[in-house]
Amino acid sequence: MQKHQILKIYGTDYKGMTKRLLTEADLKERIPGKGARIGIKPNLVSPTPASYGATTHPEVVAGIIEYLQENGFRNLVIAEGSWVGDKTAEAVSACGYDELVGQYGVEFLDTQKDGSYKADCKGLELNICNCVKEIDFLINVPVLKGHCQTKITCALKNMKGLIPNSEKRRFHSLGLHRPIAHLGLGIRQDFIVVDHICGDLDFEDGGNPVVKNCVMAACDPVLVDAYVCSLLHYAVQDVPYVEIAQRLGVGSADLEHAQILTCGIWNGNRLENQKQSERKEACQTDSAIQSEEKAFWQADNESLPLARKVVELQDAVEEVESCSACYGYLLPALERLKQEGLLNKLEEKICIGQGYQGKTGQIGIGRCTKDFIYNVKGCPPTEDQIYEFLKHYIGSNYVI
Ligand code: SF4
């Protein structure tokens, strides 16, 4: 597989189709020796099962592990840290990774408990978890999702799980886009397996999964994110970190010269696609196909529905440097109020983010707005806490 290619496979046998895709991509040839320490970086942003649309399916990671172990690679580590406000250990349990590591005898490294080192990432010094230094070959396994602050999240942003919590907060105070792009230089992604099974196209922490039953393989994180922009109906310019990463030399966002290819649907035993069915007609017998079974690649023309819930909800918010979890909990809470016909009764803008520390105002979310007249406590407060607080606030204002 080449750097300008993104390979896709469809199906519902997530483990089997991932293994087949990795076989087709010839992943093993990219790894520098059987003893290489291979890092696998899923997205366990919060403690919700993958079907919720936020976290990486354990079956996809199982497919990667089986493929690697069957090809003689034994030095594997899964490394991840949940977002600020949630404990990785809870996500590991809720997402089924405790069973996964037990079943395959693979180490899990909680980066929330790891130390860190400073790395000069082309003019921007960033703190990166120590475990990254020990990894010889990194396989990034992000979920293709929408994001309430950066619009999309996939390959580049998933590396935030390999920095300490304090640095995650600092990323937001730096405006998110620039540090995400520079982090692409501090942590090299050697291979990317995208979980495009049922990501939420609006919210990073899920709740509105859109089922696509697809897994992708690629080796350029910038190309992957540029492709995600196009799938989610954004121009690359709409997501500044993709452009900045390209400028820094992390990869190429040139979709015009990219090849987006699918080998079809994995039915649990073999691949099915248009070219194969043409071949079946020509061969007349199933056994003729099976005897020569190999993937036939053809252009992939997937399209996704336009998802813009976030944009509508953002009108109710004044956000300055808020952490992902805080903002990620606020928007679904607003969506619930909107569904109940309550959101349009809120006359004041809701303030959120580190930029409000030490400031005063009417209504604010989280510890950073503790000096506001009305404030939801917590760092971050949960979606339920925000929802209950705002519902009460709107209700009492409404009566007045
Ligand atoms: S209260 Fe402030 S520091 Fe805490 S999660 Fe929210 S934005 Fe971040």
Image: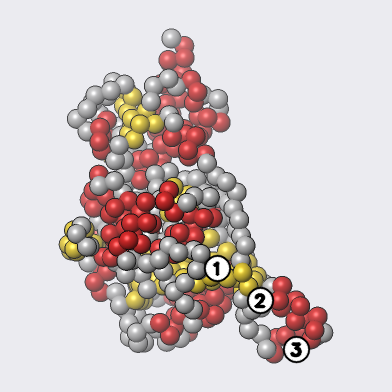
Q: CA distance from mark 3 to mark 2?
A: 14 Å
Residue 95 in the image: state x and y as whole percent.
46, 58
Q: Is residue 14 visible?
A: yes
Residue at image mark 2: 271
Residue at image mark 1: 260
Answer above or below: position of 104 versus 178: below
Specify whether 30 is left or right of 160.
Answer: right
Q: Are marks 3 and 2 in contact (CB under 8 Å)?
A: no
The outermost residue toward the top is 400
Q: Secondary structure at mark 3?
A: helix
Q: Secondary structure at mark 1?
A: strand
Q: Earlier in the sequence, mark 3 or mark 1?
A: 1
Q: Which residue is found at the position 43% from the left and 9% from the top?
A: 400
- Which sits in the foreground, 300 or 356? 300
Residue 51 in the image: state x and y as whole percent.
54, 54
Q: Which residue is found at the position 35% from the left and 45% from the top?
A: 324
- Which sits in the foreground, 9 or 185? 185
Residue 129: name its quadrant.
Answer: bottom left
Specify whether 196 is left or right of 316.
Answer: right
Residue 361 in the image: state x and y as whole percent.
28, 23
Residue at image mark 3: 288
Q: Are marks 2 and 1 in contact (CB under 8 Å)?
A: no
Q: Earlier in the sequence, mark 3 or mark 2?
A: 2
Specify whether 211 is left or right of 365.
Answer: right
Q: Which residue is found at the position 40% from the left and 66% from the top?
A: 252
Which colour assignment does the render follow?
secondary structure
Q: Which residue is found at the position 50% from the left and 68% from the top?
A: 258
Q: CA distance from mark 2 to mark 1?
A: 18 Å
